[in-house]
Amino acid sequence: MDLARSKRLKNMTESKIQSEIMAACNKAETRAWRNNIAKLQVRGRWVNFGIPGKGGSDLIGFHTMTIEPRHVGQKVAVFLAIECKTETGKASPEQKNFIEFVRSRGGIAGIARSASDAVKLINQYQPC
């Protein structure tokens, strides 16, 4: 990593990284949205929000791919989960488990510390 990029990344918050990743991903065949994880009490009952709850990635979405040879020309959306971290940020065990779960089911999942990391994650995807 070059010095200029290293200095830039040290000053970035996860929120800024998420925004840059969403802008980079929301082009052509990929869409990503913020996955807000929360718990709220409504009329005396706790309601969980976000996918899948604790450990869910910061961004979720899909990447459209053309399947071959049986489905030539048809497109399919591949589930996408991106955990956004600062240069020094670490994924929790629950976040690592969710990433592995998505990957084991044929989805695209990983940790990104920049928009270029997220684009690389998507571009390196190889279906099972």
Image (cartoon, grey):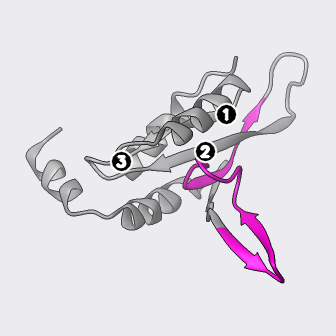
Label 3, secondary structure: give it: loop
User: The N terminus is located in which quarter?
Assistant: top left
Residue under numbered circle 3: 113
Label 2, secondary structure: give it: strand
Assess disc 2: are there few (<14), some (14-19) or many (≥20) residues with their C-alpha within 10 Å of its C-alpha: many
Which of pointers 2 and 3 lies earlier in the amino acid sequence? 2
Magenta stretch, residue numbers: 39-66
How far is the residue under mark 1 from the one under mark 3? 19 Å
Q: Is residue 60 magenta?
A: yes
Figure check: 11 above or below 80: below
Given the image, on which type of amino acid does mark 2 rest? Ala
How far is the residue under mark 2 from the one under mark 3? 14 Å
Residue drawn at x 72%, y 64% as measured from the top left: 49
Figure check: 11 above or below 104: below
Left or right, residue 39 beside residue 68: left
Label pair 2/1, CB-CB below 8 angstroms: yes
Given the image, on which type of amino acid does mark 1 rest? Val
Hey, which quadrant is residue 80 in on the image? Answer: top right
Residue under numbered circle 2: 81
> What mark, if any, has residue 102 been given in the picture?
1
Left or right, residue 1 beside residue 25: left
Hey, which quadrant is residue 33 in on the image? Answer: bottom right
How far is the residue under mark 2 from the one under mark 1? 7 Å
User: The C terminus is located in which quarter?
Assistant: top right
Closer-to-camera residue (18/98): 98
